Image (cartoon, coloured by chain):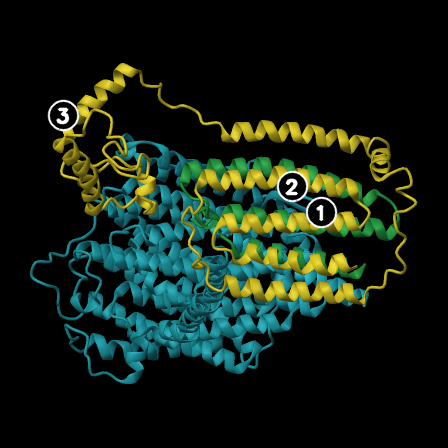
Amino acid sequence: MFDYVWLLVAFPAAGAALLLTWGKESDRFGHLIATVASALSFVWGLVLFIGLLGRDGDDRSITDSLFTWFSSGAFHVEMSLVFDPLSALFVLLITGVGTLIHVYSIGYMEHDERRRRFFAFLNLFIAAMLTLVLAGDYLVLFLGWEGVGLASYLLIGFWQHKPSAAAAAKKAFVVNRVGDLGMALALMLMFAQFGTTSIQLVNDSVGSASAGVATALGLLLLLGACGKSAQVPLQSWLLDAMEGPTPVSALIHAATMVTAGVYLVVRSSGVYDASEVARTAVVVVGLVTLLVGAYIGCAKDDIKKALAGSTMSQIGYMMLAAGLGPYGYAFAIFHLITHGFFKANMFLGAGSVMHGMNDDVDMRHYGALRKAMPVTFATFGLGYLAIIGFPGFSGFFSKDKIIEAALGENLWVGLAALLGAGVTAFYMTRLMAMTFFGEKRWRDEVHPHESPRVMTIPLIVLAAASVLGGLLLLGDWITDWLEPVVGHTEHHELAVPPIVISLIVTAVVAVGVAVGWFTYGARAVDDTAPTKVSPFTRAGRADLYGDAINDVVVVRPTMALARGLEWFDRRGLDAFAVGVGSRLGELAQGLRRSQTGYVRTYALGIFIGALVLTLALMAVTF
Amino acid sequence: MTTFWIVAPLIVLASLGLLFARKAVHAALGLAVVMIGLAVLYAVQDAPFLFAVQIIVYTGAIMMLFLFVVMLVGVDSGVSLRETLSGQKVAAAVVGIGFGLLLVLGVAQLSLGPVTGLAEANQHGNVYGLAELMFGPFVLAFQFTAALLVTAVLGAMVLAHRERLTPRSSQAELAAQRLRDYAESGKHPGNPPTPGVFARHNAVDSPALLPDGSPAPGSVPDSLVDRGQVLDVTTDDVDDVHRQIGRRGEGEDEK
Amino acid sequence: MNEYLALSMILFTIGAVGVLVRRNAIIVFMCVELMLNATNLALVSFSRQHGNLDGQLAAFFVMVVAAAEVVVGLAIIVSIHRARRSVSVDDAHLLNL
């Protein structure tokens, strides 16, 4: 059974190939093919997962070596797929959420004449993402890594007729290249140091390598993770990526692809276990992103961008957890999965709202939609409760565990994470209040309506998952399940019992909710964004000046350098080359005068030569 | 030695004629003097055979050939003395004087030792000695010179030969052409008047006279007209003729 | 002996300068002949100096070659004159195009 792990990748890959090569006649049913391909993958993943459950804890890692990808001298890469507890969870998350989003997209993209292409790209993404998480070799992982990058680029720019979408796609691609540079360098370092890029071998042997190598490897992989997971300092592309169709935002830029960085860090646990510095860097990156994302989420009026800020923030949580090492790996994955559920749920809910509001994304034009879209409101509400960590919901358990582990690691880190939880509660309450409560502020020509069944069913399923995701922690199931991959999850001995921490977190969340409600829910919201706002708000609206910083730090110096080089090329090198040429030309013009064509001139030359020769002879002789 | 000091200045003066003579004929004559002078110097230096060859080949054959070509292309075939290449004369003078001075000074410093003289080599006679060499060690070079001369003759023939591009016109065509010219430009179809027909002087340089006593155009070759060598046939001359004729006539009338 | 050589040098130089300054091809050719004769004089002089006839023989060969050269050279001048109506060496400067 496990010999056919590759079928997981093969189904969506075949779907993508089929849809991209088939002609127009597949327009009518192309989306169904893609959905079925994704669903088949999910079913097969489920079968494999159950098969894995039936095995002993020590026997739960299956490596399938399909073929030798390439073998060149000492460099040998197997196209190997690893199906183990970690990748099994990811497979289920990706194919499960992915299939639901396929179904949702059938309704969402119904009127788009290029729907078949959209589904082809979705399938391509699923295939690439599965390659990424199933890879047994960093190079195979890199293949999937670039594959999801490509799919992300294609889908962000799916509406390429919009200049903003095309620009956003380009931006995502370019920023991701910076991260990919880190990945590529990490690959080279692995090969130089260990002679292999196999994930297993690298993580096993990194402990025996020098600390410097482990740190370098950790930092390079972190750079790659930052690019893919939109972590500071490579966060700027994610907000612009919301230009893509909403299902794409839900699937790629919330639930799956952006969490690839977390997956990479967890997968490379051997590397991070070996380097304290790299782990600290991960914690810092996660913490900063957590706060930055939450800050941005507070300031945005665009519903998708507010959610995107939230996504950054939540991934910051995961990174933070992953950076805590053995204390946090399992919780990082746990939060990743629950986040995948509730964030996909909320993005799809936002898509449903937009669908009913003529694709308006400004929350200031919403208000009081709970009556117009009851199903969307209900499912979105459940997602909301999950993300703020309402007791009993999935986010409560996952976030709680991370804050707990952070507090055990370092008091200030824990407090910052706690603050993040409060801010999360605030901005999510703001979003809820502006969208579904208060006065109706929509335009007269807009007629909000509930979305069709094909869109609401995935919402309901995801909402259920958001609520029930916490069950994974039941009896420490998830930590035990992941133990073969990430090692035993240790626990800090805290000064206070965990229940107290949970209460504190809940209290902080309650404060956040209350502030949010009294600011936006109980009071009327302006129809247009107020322009006279504090510098803090303005900073948030400008994404905390992420683009400006990039502009000043990278773009302008690069442009200046390029201009300088161009100037040097034109005025220096070219001028030198041209100058040499024209001086030679002038010299030749001068010498040309000596070539009169008159025989007597040449005879004179000969005679002068004879004179000189005679002189020389005489000088030698006498 | 006396001979040398007499001949050498003559040779140098004559050779300078090559540089300064305005007419090619004068230059050729200067060169002939140089050749003869050199022949004398050969004779002085125990080279009687070369003396003879120099006179015969150079002065006799080559110089005649030069003069012949000078005549052929025109004695003064319009090569002006004005220099076209700026600085060429000055440069040539400077370099030439420098070169000459250098060589002469170099030779002056040379000490060649006592002259061996050719008494021994010429003991059977100079021609005999040369023949001994020519048909001995240098016989191959001699053969080559023979081949060279034959080749040169053939080359000269080829170069001087003019290929006819159009067929030679027949007499009928020439006559037709002449009448056509007369029709178009009024050119007289017949012969031009012969010189001196009605003249006192029966020579090519005296133009024929028309009945009114004026010279007939075209009766003297163009080249003589160009050179201004046409005899002046004044009216006085005609009167003179009249007078002579009249006196005799009167005398006859009287009879 | 040196005076013969000096005369030879002077004649050679005059010939060379003549080649440089004269433009009538015939006179240029005469100057070349003068240079050849100057070398002949030197050859004959050296023959006497060294006491053998090799120099005289060489001078003889020079004369023969000069004769051949004159024949061909004058033929060339005549044919050029026929084609261009000029014997000025400066008129043949087609290299300067």
- Residue at (20, 25) in percent of width and height: B189
CB within 8 Å, label 1 to label 3:
no
Residue bearing mark 2: B58
The colour of chain A is cyan
Q: Position of residue B146 (x, y in %)?
A: 71, 29
Of helix, strand and loop, which one carries label 3? helix
- The amino acid pointed to by label 2 is Tyr
- The amino acid pointed to by label 3 is Ala
Q: Position of residue C90 (x, y in %)?
A: 46, 50
Rendered position, B229 above or below A448: above
- Residue at (46, 48) in percent of width and height: C88
In the rendered view, does A367 fall on the left or right side of A149? Answer: left
Chain given the colour green: C
Nearer to the camera, B173 or A598: B173
CB within 8 Å, label 2 to label 1:
yes
- The amino acid pointed to by label 1 is Ala
- Residue at (50, 30) in percent of width and height: B160
Alpha carbons under labels 3 and 2: distance apart: 55 Å
Nearer to the camera, C44 or A95: C44
Residue bearing mark 1: B39
Rendered position, A147 above or below A549: above
The colour of chain B is yellow
Disc with the residue nearer the chain's start (3 vs 2): 2
Kindly identify which chain the residue marked by label 2 belongs to: B
Kindly identify which chain the residue marked by label 3 belongs to: B
Q: Position of residue B173 (x, y in %)?
A: 26, 17
Disc with the residue nearer the chain's start (2 vs 1): 1
Residue bearing mark 3: B183
CB within 8 Å, label 3 to label 2:
no
